[in-house]
Image: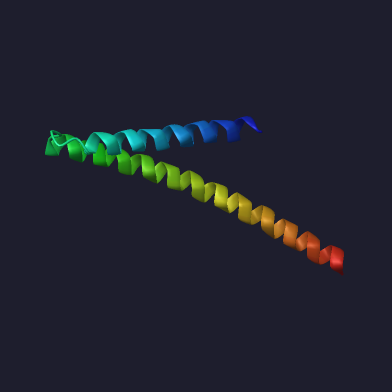
């Protein structure tokens, strides 16, 4: 696996773990509203980062798929 891909996976899974931790913290009935808002903002930021990474990967997969489709069409002609 390429080094950049490994870093992406580590970062992605770390971010997901942080989101899980934030959710667990937000379930605390003693959490203040201000702290809840701060945690929510952190969670949204992490979720956006994860979605951005996934969209980037999706774009790469689409390019690879188009190349494969074009190759198959050429080889059938």
Quarter holding the C terminus? bottom right
Give the residue at x 29% y 39%: 23
Answer with left or right where residue 67 lies relative to residue 23: right
Residue 21 is situated, as x and y percent measured from the top left of the image, at 32, 33
Answer with left or right where residue 76 lies relative to residue 27: right
| Chosen colour scheme | rainbow
Number of numbered discs: 0
Is 57 drawn above or below residue 25 in the view shown? below
Residue 18 is situated, as x and y percent measured from the top left of the image, at 36, 33
In front: 13, or 49? 13
Give the residue at x 44% y 32%: 14
* Res. 24 image quadrant: top left
Answer with left or right where residue 31 lies relative to residue 54: left
In front: 71, or 29? 29
Give the residue at x 38% y 45%: 48
Give the residue at x 49% y 44%: 53
Residue 13 is situated, as x and y percent measured from the top left of the image, at 47, 35
Quarter holding the N terminus? top right
Answer with left or right where residue 4 lies relative to residue 72: left
Residue 28 is situated, as x and y percent measured from the top left of the image, at 19, 35
């Amino acid at each position: 696996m390429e080094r950049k891909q490994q870093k992406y996976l580590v970062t992605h899974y770390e971010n997901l773990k942080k989101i899980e931790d934030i959710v667990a913290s937000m379930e605390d009935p003693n959490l203040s509203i201000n702290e809840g808002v701060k945690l929510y903002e952190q969670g949204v930021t992490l979720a956006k980062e994860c979605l951005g990474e996934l969209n980037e990967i999706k774009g790469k997969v689409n390019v690879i798929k188009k190349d494969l489709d074009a190759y198959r069409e050429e080889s059938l002609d």
